[in-house]
Amino acid sequence: MTADQADTHCPYCALQCGTRLSRQDGAVRVEPSDFSVNRGGLCHKGWTAPALLDTPDRLRHPLLRGPDGRHTPVAWDTALDRVAERLRRIRAEHGPDAVAVFGGGGLTNEKAYLLGKFARIALGTSQIDYNGRFCMSSAAAAGNAAFGVDRGLPFPVTDLADADTVLLAGANVAETMPPLLRHLERASLIVIDPRRTRTAELAALHLQPAPGTDLALALGLLHVAVTEGWCDRSYVAARTSGFDEAWQRALGWWPERVERVTGVPAEDQRAAVRMLTEARRAYVLTGRGVEQHSKGADTAAAFINLALALGLPGRPGSGYGCLTGQGNGQGGREHGQKADQLPGYRSITDPAARTHVARVWGVDPAELPGPGRSAYRLLDALGRPDGPRALLVFGSNPVVSVPDAGRIGERLAALDLLVVADFVPSETARLADVVLPVSQWAEEEGTLTSLEGRVLRRRRLLDPPAGVRGDLAVIQGLATRLGQPAARFPTAPHEVFDELGRASGGGPADYSGISYERLDAGEALYWPCPARPADQAAHPGTPRLFLDRFAHPDGRARFAAVDHRDVAEPATADYPLTATTGRVLAHYQSGAQTRRVAELLAAVPEVYAEMHPDTAAAAGLADGQTAVVRSRRGRMRARVKVVHTMRPDTVFLPFHFPGAGRANLITNPALDPRSEMPEFKACAVRIGPEDSEG
Ligand code: SF4
């Protein structure tokens, strides 16, 4: 059943702006709903989201690739039978780990949960990970180590509205989530970014480090805090441990040395820490700019160290947080589609967690596989002798979004079977042997968890087009064909959510006290929200974490002893520039959705390369010309955009574009040893005109 109006949330980023959808004269209209996070605002993507619903190339039938390489529409039973038969054969010949699953940070909690369960008990494979590995994993690793739990913002977004000073490290919120600025109007902003972004233009202070040197800068800021006497010694003594070891590492990073490494003037470093110290309410927030590095977890940890030294986390009106990117980047990393994780943010290697989840699933704990490969390693293993031979992709477009994309394209081509569930023919779907057309945001019910850890209801306005099924039904259809009872894979989202709640109960991300009924009654519920006995009042959820204690057993936060190291691929004489990638306001992730919205495509129709005029001139390039950007892995083409505020040693590339304009053709898959995050933000390149060797 559908309604003429639905209060739901934007299909794109983790801010999850509240929207009201309605049907008027046959068209779907969107307006901001009464929701505290976006306060009546939407960005360009949110306003134009209804255009996605009737995009002309919407997938409406399952497709099978024939011997001639062309996709042909087939019935659902034919497609699912074919997939199940091939999966059974591959498993029989090569074992359960020969089948892999790749999920997405945009999937609802229900889909992410059921996908993880499907992989572990219907396929019996350990080989599942998701594209959130490329988004949140460094901040998650640092947050878990420091605080004992990982929730992007451990406080409501609206708390930021009272801040005096906010440090944004590697977060360009003016482009990635503009309505957030409504909560930052009062604050003085300190922005750390190699580019003079729109956010940096709003800042009271812009620190512009060389790409890949944020860790040195964070160490320098801690050095300033301690040596200037601005460290909150009583907070450090009462609420933390590990300060001395962390300080030993920061000791050698005095501001003038940091200036030599990062290019940020020593005086600006002191000014930044002074602004944070003098503020009554201050926040340190990190984003992908500092996290998407081969040392991203240590860099996030170094900013947490700074926040702890200043006594911010857990202090009312102040704090540390990381700004989650994808729509369900938070919930998507909590319920079991990560290689090392079971629902409720439980570890798959923890015997007690395995027993608990296996009981909810009605299986023997010994049946649950162990941890699998992380995202890049998984994709890089496809089709190799010891790697998976089949891959099921849900809600992701790795052909565009994965580093060293040319190499990963070869791995996908080496598979025996590639199955993609999507609602548009993404670049990955075009390569698939079987394409399964699924519903999208306004056609489905579910929940997502926003960047502040609040669980939100996605509500259906429309039925999906004829021929399209929900992901939950697709998962059930495959599971039953693989011998599972249908009841073990429910298709009603509220049933899946209730089971997810039970599976998460007692875990770090405990949803067991949350229900559709409570959410639909308008309660604002933030995890953890444990179930309580029927004779007690329901748990109110936890909008603010850490007010009394951190989540480690001793209640203390942990400083991390981290030190700076260079990028994995420094500039050289052959590759003298550093390329860094990022997002633009008009597009989202791989662009598979936003490039299909005419208004957004008109706003930014093609990939460009931002560079300083001197950089362009030295390479024989002019504004508007096509440049070839080469790294050791490949080459891509981009329109030159001369920007006077760029660092002359840096080239910026948005990563939303396909084909020869894929920024990820040149990016470096060097992985962070703690989070397995690739180094999207820094690789050595050279540039030149199209007809040159560059
Ligand atoms: Fe959607 Fe994010 Fe834009 Fe809000 S800021 S409208 S959630 S894309």
Image: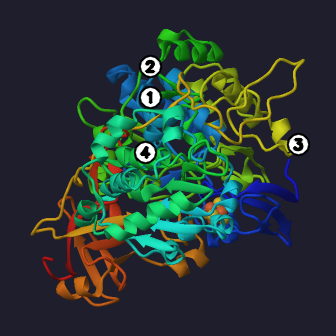
Mark 2 or 4 closer to N-term?
A: 4
Q: Are marks 2 and 1 in contact (CB under 8 Å)?
A: yes
Q: For the C terminus, which image quadrant? A: bottom left
Please tell me how many numbered marks the rendered image carries: 4
Crowdedness of circle 3 by 10 Å Cα count: few (<14), some, many (20+)? few
Secondary element at tag 1? loop
Disc marking residue 340: 1
Q: Quadrant of residue 109?
A: top right
678 with respect to 106 (left or right): left
Name the residue tied to disc 3: 521
Q: Which x, y percent locates residue 65?
A: 44, 49
Mark 1 or 3 closer to N-term?
A: 1
The quarter of the image that holds ligand 1 is bottom right
Three-letter amino acid code at disc 3?
Ala
Image position of 602 with respect to 369: above or below:
below
Specify whether residue 527 is in view. Answer: yes
Q: CA distance from mark 4 to mark 3?
A: 40 Å
Secondary element at tag 2? loop
Q: Is mark 2 within 8 Å of ligand 1?
A: no
Three-letter amino acid code at disc 2?
Thr
Question: Is 246 or 324 nearer to us in this picture?
Answer: 246
Mark 2 or 1 closer to N-term?
A: 1
